[in-house]
Amino acid sequence: MKKIVLTGGGTAGHVTPNLALLPALKEAGYEITYMGSYDGIEKRLIADFDIPYVGISTGKFRRYLDLRNFTDPFRVVKGFSEARKFLKGYQPDVVFSKGGFVSVPVVRAASTLGIPCVIHESDMTPGLANKLCLSSARKVCCNFPETLKLLPEKKAVLTGSPIRAELSQGSRLAGLNMCGFSANTPVIMVIGGSLGAANVNKAVREALPRLLEDFQVVHLCGKEKVDNLLLNTPGYRQFEYVKAELKDLFAMADLVISRAGANAICELLALKKPNVLIPLPAGSSRGDQLLNAQSFEAQGFSLVIDEDDLTTDLLIDRIHELYFNRQKFHDAMNRSGQMDSIKTIVKLLEEVQQPL
């Protein structure tokens, strides 16, 4: 049986595309092992899939001054040693990386052992972890056509982002029952990301009294971000994070408010959900979400609010504008050419195993 090691973590966006690949990889006859950090979100997310999990030490590569910059390199070196030891014994046929800092020691270690690696970049510009892995990768998958020119020409392949098939198989009724919502009032779904989004959470909650006049709101607010004072508010439900139930919440949602991480917005496109994007500002990130949001806005898939401009009035205005024009956004998304990302990536994984 062929063996594959999947890696990627730190946020849900570095894990969920790997989860989307699982059924196709199993169908292709792969034995699958996941490598991630000892206690990252990837360990929790993969736990439901009955797949062996190997934890390694990891550190973060920061672009700013931090005391941990002096200690984390030692953790990365330790992670490289741990990854290499496991890979040498396990002898996988291929490694697939979705990025995030935990992936760097895995990909680098695999390269030293001659194990072919395929990496995937979701954002328009390559992240630091993937940049550090470019030289070790046989192929680099990307999500946006604009990204191709930023990658090595002979390695870059436009694949799109793998989307979990089950997300399109949800039950609207199950979502309504889960939240205790009425079937007669439209639903807004707020997605702050797996780590939460404090400013988005704050803006939505400040707007709640006026939003609840016309909508019901389900809010995925992130770990330890539930507001206990709002637990009994009619028409408003909060969850830290959901797994299997996510498909039902998507089926129930008429509109979505979200950050602009590439995997999240690709799921919105695949599900044809009209959305308001509030990208993480450049001061809090490397600016990739701003570029992602601009691309989706230009294609007519999304309305965008810059976080620096975010106010209660603006948020409510954009939501009403989106709802009033929702058919226009549906039509634009229906015209988009959706790629079969999973099939393309699985084919790439087979190709890189051929002798050079």
Image (tube, helix red, strand yellow):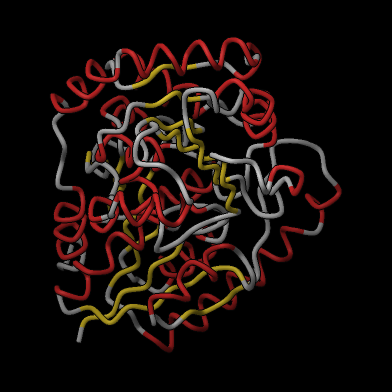
Q: Is residue 264 left or right of residue 235?
A: left
- The structure residue drawn at horizontal position 78% and vertical position 49%, both measured from the top left corner, is 69
Seen in the picture, residue 58 relative to 191 is either above or below; the reply is: below
Pinpoint residue 117: horizontal percent, then vertical percent. 33, 61
87 or 208: nearer the viewer: 208
Q: Is residue 225 left or right of residue 111?
A: right
348 or 244: nearer the viewer: 244
Q: Residue furthest right?
A: 67
Seen in the picture, residue 123 relative to 84 is either above or below; the reply is: above
Q: Quadrant of residue 31?
A: bottom left
- The structure residue drawn at horizontal position 41% and vertical position 17%, both measured from the top left corner, is 303
Pinpoint residue 65: horizontal percent, then vertical percent. 81, 38
Query: In what quadrant of the picture does the C terminus appear?
Result: bottom left
Q: Quadrant of residue 80?
A: bottom right
149 or 313: nearer the viewer: 313
Q: Is residue 37 left or right of residue 274?
A: right
